Image: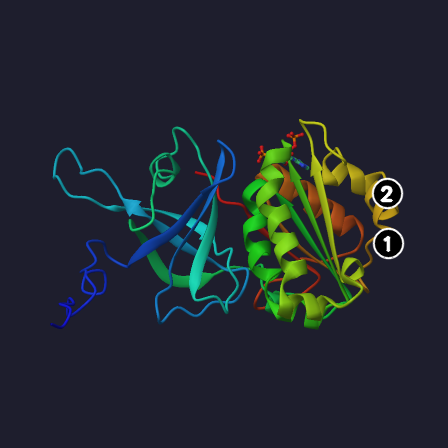
Amino acid sequence: MTEQRPVQDAKAIKVPALPDAQTVTEVKHWTDRLFSFRCTRPASLRFRSGEFVMIGLMGDPDPKTGKQKPLLRAYSIASPSWDDELEFYSIKVPDGPLTSRLQHIQPGDEIILRPKPVGTLVHDALLPGKRLWLFATGTGFAPFASLLRDPQTYEDYDEVIITHTCREVGELTYGAELIDSIRKDEMLGELIGADKLARLRYYPTTTREPSAKMGRITDLMRSGEVYRDLGVEPITPEHDRAMVCGNLAFNLEIKQLLESYGLEEGANSAPAQYVVEKAFLD
Ligand code: A2P
């Protein structure tokens, strides 16, 4: 007697209930304020590492009309452009209209994803340079999680330095594990080279909980401590390029600092020496 098998997988014939629906494949909670998740990638979606898309869920029905509208926010894609799936890294805001609900998603659930990637944290917006600095606070690490897994980052620069400032040690874990996985990755590890530490440098700091290195990165730059710790020359417009992603106050402060070193802000249409983007906040 032959075994009875369903003709098609139930999942494969499932009709999406949402517009631009994608299916969640994995969810990881890092702290009570942070989580990351992966979802299916639309076959037609092409993006440059570092770009963002609008994602979200259906909002509550309008009390008068009963109609539901999508509730969308800009999220940097944290996965590299070669990945089959998409990854996102998010804060959980208890009263946030989207993240108060998004934090409860489970594998198998659907989210809305508008497949129109945009953004300035892309290689095309920077002129060629020797050293690339990636400055992040909090969930601002997300676009760099994409760029750090893109081979082009190591092909374009001799050295890549990522700094990540968070309030507490637990908030560094997503980034720390990612850096570790890159160093162990067969393909990326080879690109970074035998002298791994010299090509990809990771500089995590905390501001409200004791850790190996404490302080805001901006203060550590002004005092020169970060350059002494890493054993590198201070930033110059000739050699250095920078990408910045964090909270608004941080972005403004580091923008001023980079300009005091003589770097100019670039854009897709006019590449220059540094680029900035605001981290997602609900
Ligand atoms: P601090 O604890 O001193 O405010 P948040 O979670 O509020 O987005 O902050 C993430 C990290 O960014 C925190 O470590 C915070 O430090 C730091 N930060 C906030 N504002 C600035 C700024 N203007 N310059 C540098 N770092 C900042």
The reply, left or right, for residue 11 in relation to residue 181 is: left
First-in-chain label (1 vs 2)? 2
Kindly identify the amino acid type of the residue bearing the numbered disc 2: Gly
Ligand 1 within 8 Å of disc 1? The answer is no
- Residue 152 % position (x, y): 63, 71
On screen, residue 152 above or below 221: below
Dot in front, 1 or 2: 1
The colour mode here is: rainbow
- Residue 45 % position (x, y): 39, 68
Q: Residue furthest front?
A: 1
The residue singled out by tag 1 in the image is: 232
The reply, left or right, for residue 4 in relation to residue 126 is: left
Q: Residues within 10 Å of mark 2 (few under 14, many from 20)?
A: few
Q: Nearer the viewer, residue 256 or 164?
A: 164
Q: Judge whether residue 271 can be spotted in this image.
A: no
Q: Quadrant of residue 239?
A: bottom right
C-alpha gap between disc 1 and disc 2:
10 Å
On screen, residue 227 above or below 44: above
What residue appears at the point 46 percent right and 44 percent down from the top-left corner? 28
What residue appears at the point 47 percent right and 67 percent down from the top-left corner? 47
The residue singled out by tag 2 in the image is: 224
Instruction: Give the structural element (helix, strand or loop) at label 2.
Output: loop
Kindly identify the amino acid type of the residue bearing the numbered disc 1: Val
